[in-house]
Image: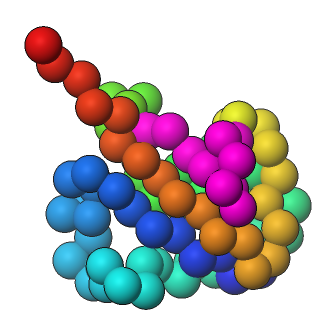
Amino acid sequence: MKIRVKLRGTLPHKFPEYDHQQGLDIDIADEASVQDLLNHLQLTDSDKCAIAIDGRIAKAEQKLKGLTSVNIFQIAHGG
């Protein structure tokens, strides 16, 4: 299935082909979860991401649906 992913923060720097207007179109297995998508993108816990699917915060085990819009935000931290 196809998933459109938009990356926020400095995450787009990890993907030279990233288009800030369109995002990334990812082909991923049917019944894939948010965690499967993060693994596919090689984003790890050290990347500190929050994921929103169609405007709602998602958990790692949530299943993706075709033609879903996924936003991956880099969590800001510091002091």
* Residue 65 at least partly seen: yes
Residue 56: say if magenta.
yes
Q: How is the image coloured?
A: rainbow
> What percent of the width, then of the height, locates residue 56?
70, 47
Question: Is residue 12 found left or right of 43 in the rendered image?
Answer: left
Question: Is residue 32 found left or right of 28 in the rendered image?
Answer: right
Residue located at (83% from left, 52% from top): 63
Identity of the residue furthest to the top in this view: 79
> What percent of the width, then of the height, locates residue 47?
33, 37
Q: Is residue 58 above or below residue 1?
A: above
Number of numbered callouts drawn: 0
Point out the image quarter for the N terminus.
bottom right
Q: Is residue 5 above or below residue 44?
A: below
Residue located at (46% from left, 59% from top): 41
Question: Is residue 21 found left or right of 58 in the rendered image?
Answer: left
Residue located at (35% from left, 42% from top): 74
Residue 66: say if magenta.
no
Q: Is residue 11 above or below residue 3?
A: above
In this picture, which residue range is highlighted in magenta? 49-58
* Residue 44 at least partly seen: no
- Is 65 in front, or is 75? 75
Q: Is residue 15 above or below residue 18?
A: above
Secondary structure mostly seen in magenta is strand
Quarter of the image holding residue 62?
Answer: top right
Residue located at (43% from left, 78% from top): 23
